[in-house]
Image: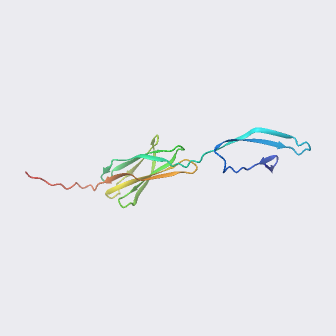
């Protein structure tokens, strides 16, 4: 049943929580208050769609760090392939040192279809091994999220030449 909102406006509320995903049509039938109870029906007065909720997080693959090693001051490029049927809202790279402490969190930007990139300047970092976690969020209303921890690794050298032995013949 519809309720009067005044001024010939009527509204109805339907709980769709148990409805199957589909396209629905609304037919409206009005009956006047005369003794004859005259009625008029408007078929297909409105349509609406109930969608299947997106519960799948983005897929993350092909994570690379270029170069895989360098001296302090090296610009490391972090690249990831991220796909999602509803679109990708955001991608970020988290760089961790060998003690798992967060060194940097970088917003990644699109570098082409499904490819996101960020650049990290290692000038202020201490030498050692680093890992990269990638987190992506999709554009669905539920903002599904996926994180791949340890998706890639790279090394920052000390900048000192490796010790070597001189061999005499």
In depth, the one of 128 and 158 nearer the eye is 128
In the image, is 144 to the left or to the right of 96? right
Residue at the limit of the structure toward the right, as seen here: 35
Query: Which residue corresponds to the image point at 69% horizontal and 42% vertical from the top-left?
Result: 24
| Residue 72 visible at all | no
**Residue 131 location (% of width, % of height):** 37, 54
In the image, is 115 to the left or to the right of 12? left
Query: Which residue corresponds to the image point at 68% horizontal and 42% vertical from the top-left?
Result: 48
In depth, the one of 36 and 152 nearer the eye is 36
The coloring applied to the image is: rainbow
Q: Quadrant of residue 124?
A: bottom left
Query: Which residue corresponds to the image point at 82% horizontal and 43% vertical from the top-left?
Result: 30
**Residue 6 location (% of width, % of height):** 81, 50
| Residue 52 visible at all | yes
Query: Which residue corresponds to the image point at 34% horizontal and 52% vertical from the top-left?
Result: 154
In the image, is 161 to the left or to the right of 58? left
**Residue 140 location (% of width, % of height):** 56, 48
**Residue 138 location (% of width, % of height):** 52, 48
């Amino acid at each position: 049943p519809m309720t009067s909102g005044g001024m010939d406006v009527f509204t109805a509320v339907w709980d769709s929580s148990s409805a199957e995903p589909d396209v629905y049509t609304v037919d409206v039938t009005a009956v006047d208050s005369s003794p004859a109870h005259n009625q008029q029906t408007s078929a297909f007065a409105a349509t609406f769609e109930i969608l299947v909720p997106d519960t799948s997080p983005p897929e993350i693959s092909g994570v690379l760090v270029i170069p895989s090693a360098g001296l302090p001051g090296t610009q490391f490029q972090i690249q990831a392939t991220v796909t999602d049927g509803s679109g990708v809202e955001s991608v970020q790279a988290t760089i961790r040192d060998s003690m798992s402490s967060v060194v940097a969190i970088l917003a990644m930007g699109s570098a082409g279809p499904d490819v996101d990139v960020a650049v990290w300047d290692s000038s202020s970092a201490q030498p050692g091994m680093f890992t990269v976690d990638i987190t992506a969020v999709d554009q669905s209303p539920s903002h599904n999220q996926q994180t791949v921890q340890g998706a890639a690794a790279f090394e920052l050298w000390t900048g000192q030449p490796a010790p070597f032995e001189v061999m005499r013949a």
